[in-house]
C-alpha cells in the first residue's frame, strides 16, 4: 500500500464527504431547523446535477445542451433550478404535516427521476450526460483531485458559515419555534407557511448544489446516481447519526457514514477470496446497525442540537 | 472539518515527496470491479469467477512478468456511480492495480472512468458496460470493452428477426441505459428494414403487474413481443403475464432474457415460441476451450457475460505482460495483443503467449466471446446468435449478422 495512494484515496473521500455534507446541510435546514420531513432529496440532487450538466457540457446530438458555460454558472444555475422546482412543490406539499410530507416528497422525487429517465431531448434519458467538464480537470490526477477538494471544501465552508449564521440569527430561532410549537409561533404573528417554504427552498438549493458538484466530479451523470438508496436514505442516515439541528453534526455524520461505507470494504477484502465477495454486503449491514445503535443509545445524534438561550450548553451536557 | 482537510492536504504533500521511494510490490494486481451488491447481484458472481479463472490460469502457467503472481482484487461498484468511483479509487490507490476489469454497469463505468481511471491513466476493460455513451468518452484510449455496444445487438437482432419473417412486433423495454439503448437501435433498424413496430413502450423495474402495459402494447395488433429486460427480474414477470393472459403469441428477448430463470419458472413446454439473442463466441475452438476450463472450475459457461469477463481479464494479463508491467503502456499493449495480426492465442494458452511475447513475436488473442479486436473507440463488434428453448437450456437457431 503506497502512501501516495492512501493520500489520493483520502482526497477522494474528502470530496465525497464534502458533497454529501452539502446534502446533509440542506436536509438540516429542512428537518433540523424547520421540521420538514423531506424524503425526496434525490430529486433535488438530480435537478441540480442535470441542470449544471446541461449548462456546462459540450454539444451532443439528441439532447438539450451545448451551452458550455463556465462551471460556476452551472453551479449557480443548479441552485436556482433546484429552488425553482422546490417552490411549487413546497407550495403544495408543505400543507401536509410531517408523515404526509414524507410520502408526498418521495413521490415527487420519483416523478423527477422518471422524467429524467424518460425525456431523451432534455437529459438523454437513461444514457445520461457525459463529458461534463471538471474545474482544473486537465491537471494530472493528484493535482486535479486536490484542486477539486479545495473547491468542494470552500463551497462547503461558505455554505456552513452561511447556514450557521442563519441558525443563530433571529430567523433560526423563529424556525425552531415553528418546528417545536407551531401554534405558539402562529400566535406570535409568524407566517408559518411562508417560513416553511423558505426553509424548504433554501435546503433544496443546497441539495441541488451538491448534485452539481457530484456531476462535475464524475464528469458524467446517469439516472443510476439518483437511486433513493444512495441519494436520499444515506443522507438521512448521515444527518440522524451526526445530529439533526446541528450543522457540524450534519458534516460529521456525512464523514462518519461515508467512511464506514467505503473503508469497511477494505477491511472485508482482507478475508479469504470466497468470503470477500459475500462480505461486501456487510457494508449495508454496518450502516443499518450504526443507525440502530445511535437511535437506541444516542437519539440526539453524535453532536446534539446546541441548547439555546445562552452559552450554557457545555455545562448542561457535562451534568449528564 | 477545516483542520481535517488541512491535515489531509498536509499528509498529501508529505506523501508526494515519499512516493518515489516506495518499493515495488511482488504481486501484480488487477482490479475486478463488479456490481456485487445492487441490481445485478445475481449476475456478478459468475462474471467475477470467470475473470478469476483467467487469473488462476496465468498463475498456474508460470505467473506474470518475472514469475510474479497475478492477483484479482474484487471491488463492489453496487451498479451505481457512487459505488463505482469509490471501488475504482480504492483499486487504483490503495491496491495499486495495473489495470481494471469492470465496472459492470454502464453508469458506474462512465463515472469511474471520468473521475478516476482516465485522470490516473489506468486502462479499463468493461465486460458488460454496453451503453453507447462509452464509445464517445474522451478517454486517451484507456477505456475498452469486450462486449459490443447495445447499439450493435439491437441492430443485429432487428435484421435477423426481419429475415426470419417477423414483420410486426411490439417492443417493451426496461427503462434504463441497457433497455433504452437496445430498444432504440432495434426500432430504427427494424423500421429501416421495412418492419412495423406496432407498440413501443418503456416499463419500470420491479412492479407487481404489467398487465396494463401489456394490454396497451397488444392493441397495435402485433403477435410478437420483443422484451429487452432481465430474465431473472422484471422480464420474467412480463413474460409470465403475457403468456398467462394471451396478449402475444411469440416472444423475443435480448441477451438479458437468456437466463435459466424463465425456463425454471415457466417450464420449457410453455416457451416454445420464445427466442432470445445472446453474444456467443463464434462457434470457435476458443469458446470450447473456455467452456471446458470454466466447467472444470465449477462455473456455468452459459451464464451471461462470463465469456466477456474472462476475455477482459485474460486480455488485461496479456497487455500487462506485453507492457512489462508499466501502467502507462497497458493500453497501447492491449491494442497490440489483439489486433487481428500475429500468432493466435486461445483462452488459457498463457504459457505459449508469454514465450511469444518474450521472443518479441506478435500475438493475437482469439477470445471466448469473439476475436476481441478493438476498433478506434475501444469497442468490439459482436458475435450474436439467436437461441430457442430446448429441454432445460437454450439451443442455437441461427447466427445473427
Image (cartoon, grey):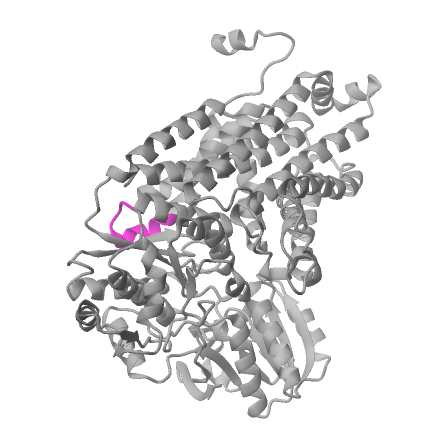
Please indicate, yes or no, whether residue B143 appears anywhere in the rendered image: yes
In this rendering, is residue A276 above or below B253? above
| Quarter of the figure with residue B162 | bottom right
Q: Which residue occupies the foreground of this view, A279 or B107?
A: B107
Q: Position of residue B109 (x, y in %)?
A: 47, 57
Question: B233 and A223: which one is in front?
Answer: A223
How many marks the image carries: the answer is 0
User: Is residue A277 found inside the magenta-colored segment of the image?
Assistant: yes
Identified at 65% across, 24% down, the residue is A162
In magenta stretch: residue A221: no
Instruction: Point out residue A318 in the picture as x, y percentages from the top left corner.
Output: 48, 9
**Among the 4 quarters of the image, the one containing residue B323:** bottom left
Which quadrant is home to the N terminus of chain A? Answer: top left
Q: Could you say which quadrant of the image residue B312 lies in?
A: bottom left
**Which of A217 and A111 lies nearest the eye of the viewer?**
A217
Q: Is residue B50 visible?
A: no
Q: Which residue: 50% across, 51% down?
A: B81
Residue A263, percent across and down? 38, 39
Q: Establish if B220 lies above or below A164.
A: below
The reply, left or right, for residue A170 in relation to residue A126 is right
Whole-percent x, y for residue A241 in the image: 51, 30
The region drawn magenta spans A269-280
Image: B282 above or below B17: below
Position of residue B78 in the picture relative to residue B356 (left or right): right
Amino acid at each position: 500500500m503506497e502512501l501516495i495512494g492512501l493520500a489520493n484515496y483520502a482526497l477522494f473521500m474528502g470530496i465525497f464527504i464534502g458533497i454529501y455534507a452539502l446534502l446533509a446541510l440542506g436536509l438540516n435546514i429542512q428537518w433540523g431547523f424547520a421540521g420538514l420531513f423531506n424524503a425526496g432529496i434525490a430529486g433535488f440532487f438530480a435537478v441540480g446535477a442535470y441542470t449544471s450538466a446541461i449548462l456546462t457540457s459540450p454539444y451532443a446530438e439528441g439532447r438539450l445542451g451545448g451551452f458550455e458555460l463556465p462551471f460556476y454558472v452551472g453551479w449557480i444555475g443548479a441552485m436556482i433550478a433546484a429552488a425553482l422546482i422546490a417552490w411549487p412543490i413546497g407550495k403544495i406539499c408543505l400543507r401536509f404535516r410531517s408523515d404526509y410530507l414524507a410520502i408526498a416528497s418521495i413521490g415527487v422525487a420519483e416523478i423527477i427521476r422518471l422524467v429524467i429517465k424518460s425525456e431523451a431531448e432534455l437529459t438523454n434519458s437513461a444514457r445520461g450526460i457525459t463529458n461534463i467538464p471538471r474545474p482544473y480537470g486537465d491537471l494530472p490526477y493528484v493535482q486535479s483531485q486536490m484542486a477539486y477538494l479545495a473547491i468542494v471544501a470552500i463551497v462547503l465552508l461558505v455554505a456552513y458559515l452561511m447556514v450557521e449564521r442563519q441558525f443563530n440569527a433571529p430567523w433560526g430561532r423563529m424556525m425552531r419555534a415553528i418546528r417545536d410549537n407551531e401554534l405558539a409561533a402562529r400566535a406570535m404573528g409568524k407566517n408559518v407557511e411562508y417560513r416553511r417554504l423558505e426553509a424548504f427552498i433554501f435546503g433544496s438549493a443546497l441539495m441541488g448544489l451538491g448534485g452539481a458538484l457530484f456531476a462535475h466530479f464524475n464528469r458524467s451523470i446517469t439516472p443510476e446516481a439518483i437511486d433513493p438508496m444512495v441519494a436520499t436514505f444515506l443522507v438521512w442516515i448521515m444527518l440522524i447519526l451526526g445530529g439533526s439541528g446541528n450543522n457540524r453534526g450534519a458534516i460529521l455524520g456525512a464523514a462518519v457514514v461515508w467512511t464506514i461505507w467505503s473503508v469497511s470494504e477494505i477491511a472485508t477484502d482482507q478475508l479469504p477470496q470466497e468470503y470477500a465477495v459475500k462480505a461486501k454486503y456487510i457494508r449495508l449491514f454496518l450502516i443499518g446497525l450504526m443507525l440502530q445503535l445511535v437511535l437506541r443509545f444516542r437519539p440526539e445524534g453524535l453532536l446534539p442540537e446546541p441548547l439555546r438561550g445562552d452559552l450554557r450548553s457545555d455545562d448542561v451536557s457535562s451534568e449528564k | 472539518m477545516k483542520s481535517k482537510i488541512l491535515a489531509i492536504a498536509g499528509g498529501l504533500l508529505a506523501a508526494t515527496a515519499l512516493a518515489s521511494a516506495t518499493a515495488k510490490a511482488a504481486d501484480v494486481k488487477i482490479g475486478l470491479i463488479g456490481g456485487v451488491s445492487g441490481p445485478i447481484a445475481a449476475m456478478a458472481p459468475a462474471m467475477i469467477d470467470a475473470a478469476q479463472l483467467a487469473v488462476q490460469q496465468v498463475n498456474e502457467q508460470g505467473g506474470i512478468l518475472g514469475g510474479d503472481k497475478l492477483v484479482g482484487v474484487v471491488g463492489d461498484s453496487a451498479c451505481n456511480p457512487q459505488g463505482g468511483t469509490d471501488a475504482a479509487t480504492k483499486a487504483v490507490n490503495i491496491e495499486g492495480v495495473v489495470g481494471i476489469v469492470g465496472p459492470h454497469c454502464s453508469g458506474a463505468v462512465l463515472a469511474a472512468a471520468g473521475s478516476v481511471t482516465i485522470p490516473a491513466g489506468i486502462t479499463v476493460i468493461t465486460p458488460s458496460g454496453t451503453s453507447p455513451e462509452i464509445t464517445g468518452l474522451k478517454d486517451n484510449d484507456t477505456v475498452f470493452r469486450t462486449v459490443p455496444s447495445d447499439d450493435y445487438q439491437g441492430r443485429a437482432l432487428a435484421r435477423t428477426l426481419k429475415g426470419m419473417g417477423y414483420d410486426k412486433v411490439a417492443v417493451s423495454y426496461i427503462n434504463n441505459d441497457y433497455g433504452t439503448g437496445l430498444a432504440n437501435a432495434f426500432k430504427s433498424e427494424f423500421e429501416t428494414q421495412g418492419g412495423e413496430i406496432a407498440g413501443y413502450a418503456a416499463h419500470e423495474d420491479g412492479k407487481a403487474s404489467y398487465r396494463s402495459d401489456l394490454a396497451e402494447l397488444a392493441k397495435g395488433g402485433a403477435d410478437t413481443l420483443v422484451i429487452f429486460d432481465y430474465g431473472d427480474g422484471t422480464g420474467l414477470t412480463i413474460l409470465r403475464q403475457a403468456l398467462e393472459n394471451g396478449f402475444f403469441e411469440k416472444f423475443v428477448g435480448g441477451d438479458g432474457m437468456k437466463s435459466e430463470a424463465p425456463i425454471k419458472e415457466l417450464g420449457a413446454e410453455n416457451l416454445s415460441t420464445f427466442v432470445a439473442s445472446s453474444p456467443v463466441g463464434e462457434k470457435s475452438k476458443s469458446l470450447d476451450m473456455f467452456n471446458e476450463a470454466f466447467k472444470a472450475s465449477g462455473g456455468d459457461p452459459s451464464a451471461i457475460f462470463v465469456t466477456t469477463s474472462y476475455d477482459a481479464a485474460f486480455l488485461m494479463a496479456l497487455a500487462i505482460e506485453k507492457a512489462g508491467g508499466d501502467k502507462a503502456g497497458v493500453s497501447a499493449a492491449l491494442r497490440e495483443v489483439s489486433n487481428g495480426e500475429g500468432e493466435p492465442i486461445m483462452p488459457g494458452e498463457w504459457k505459449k503467449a508469454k514465450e511469444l511475447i518474450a521472443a518479441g513475436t506478435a500475438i493475437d488473442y482469439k477470445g471466448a466471446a469473439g476475436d476481441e479486436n478493438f476498433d478506434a473507440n475501444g469497442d468490439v463488434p459482436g458475435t450474436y446468435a439467436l437461441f430457442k428453448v430446448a429441454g432445460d437450456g437454450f439451443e442455437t437457431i441461427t447466427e445473427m449478422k
